[in-house]
Image: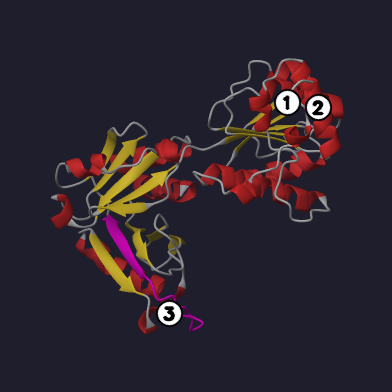
Amino acid sequence: MKQLLEDLAQIIRDGQSVAYTALVETRGSTPQKAGAAMLVFPDGSQTGTLGGGCVEAEVKRKALRILDSGESQLLTFQLDNDYGWDDGLICGGRMKMLVDPIRPGETNTEYFRKYQEMISSGQGCTEAVVIDAEKTGGNETDRFLLNETGEVVASRATAEMPPAVLENMRPVSQRPRPYVTEGVSYMPHLRRCRLVIVGGGHVGQKVAELAADVDFDVWVVDDREQYCNTERFPNAKRLIVAPIDSALSGLDVDSDTMCIIVTRGHNHDEEALYHLAETPARYVGMIGSKRKIKLIFEDLLREGIAREALSQVHAPLGFEIGSQTVPEIAVSIVAELIAHRNLSEVPDEYRSQSVLDGIAETV
């Protein structure tokens, strides 16, 4: 979405025509879920995708006609024999699309500028689209952009926002997925999570690469400049070269921060966990054998770190997938990070069994 909105902003600045299409509701099995978006240009080319197949071709065909008319519309497609995949497979679900034409001279483009600004900066926001006028009392295709506190920051609408829009909106802090309630489609954009990687070695480097691809803002901490630099971490938002103790002491860590400890040694791991265990981080994980982790936990308990805080640490971190190589280890770690970022309640099978179970209450 970030790249698509950046492309859209440039198109508007250039005074070109484009049809913004967005999937606002799905039922049953569909190739894409609500929130997918696509730009359709007058020559039939596109940016983004709604899932491919015959239905995408039909959306493009109708979007070009709507672009000529200049009036936003909702389109509904039943994915049966008429709209199967190009290879003949049929999903069997239903997709509802918003098609919003933007033409040269368009005056109400502030909505898209604000939308792009919020997504690019990683702020949490929700786009609400009226898809059933009878249920809401509003006008179909009206769009409202709301910030994390529910304040309307921009609208692309022909009527006032119906009270039901705000009444039924779920807080972005709960990290909801797209949903439809009382005739309104809600498409939340969650605040981007920061991932602090302590340790710039091979595992940290590979995790950073994968994490950046799945929309984490990556920070890397290491006391060695030869391991913590832009050549090794070209996509990192911030690189901190300093002793572990001073780098992590007072570091900005909040509930949208996730931290992993993958340093080169036992002492550095323990030092990092000392500073991170009692922070409000959404996730803290540490690599290593269970024996090493047990020794570190015992040391930290003696130093006064709360047992409850250590019980929340994921160690060893990563899903158990039989990892052998550095890329496999990185995949297991990033998969666990995604689960804890995207799922409001992580299933028990995703949770690490704490080594604290084998440590006496009094150490």
Looking at the rendered structure, the secondary structure element under dot 2 is helix
Q: Which residues make up the magenta segment?
A: 84-102
Q: Measured from the top left, where is residue 198 in percent x and y?
A: 73, 30
The answer to the question of whether label 3 and label 1 lie on touching residues, with beta carbons closer than 8 A, is no
Tag 2 residue:
296
Q: Is residue 226 left or right of residue 311?
A: right
> How would you rate the neighbour count of disc 1 (Cα within 10 Å): few for under 14, some for 14-19, many for 20 or more?
many
Tag 1 residue:
273
Residue at 70% from the left image edge and 42% from the top image edge: 353
Q: Measured from the top left, where is residue 104 in percent x and y?
A: 27, 52
- Residue 84's mark? 3
Residue at 31% from the left image edge and 64% from the top image edge: 96
The answer to the question of whether label 1 and label 2 lie on touching residues, with beta carbons closer than 8 A, is yes
Asked whether 161 or 171 is in front, the reply is 171
Q: Which amino acid does the dot numbered 1 rest on?
A: Leu
Looking at the rendered structure, the secondary structure element under dot 3 is loop
Asked whether 239 or 293 is in front, the reply is 293
Q: Which amino acid does the dot numbered 3 rest on?
A: Gly
Q: Is residue 157 left or right of residue 177?
A: left
Quarter holding residue 233: top right
Q: Measured from the top left, where is residue 287 in percent x and y?
A: 78, 38
| Mark 3 or mark 1: whose residue is earlier in sequence | 3
Q: Is residue 124 visible?
A: no
| Residue 221 is a magenta residue | no
- Residue 180's mark? none
Residue at 38% from the left image edge and 62% from the top image edge: 40
Report how far apart the C-alphas of labels 3 and 1 lie in the structure: 52 Å
Report how far apart the C-alphas of labels 2 and 3 lie in the structure: 56 Å
Q: Is residue 202 left or right of residue 133?
A: right
Task: Pick out the residue farthest to the front.
Answer: 361
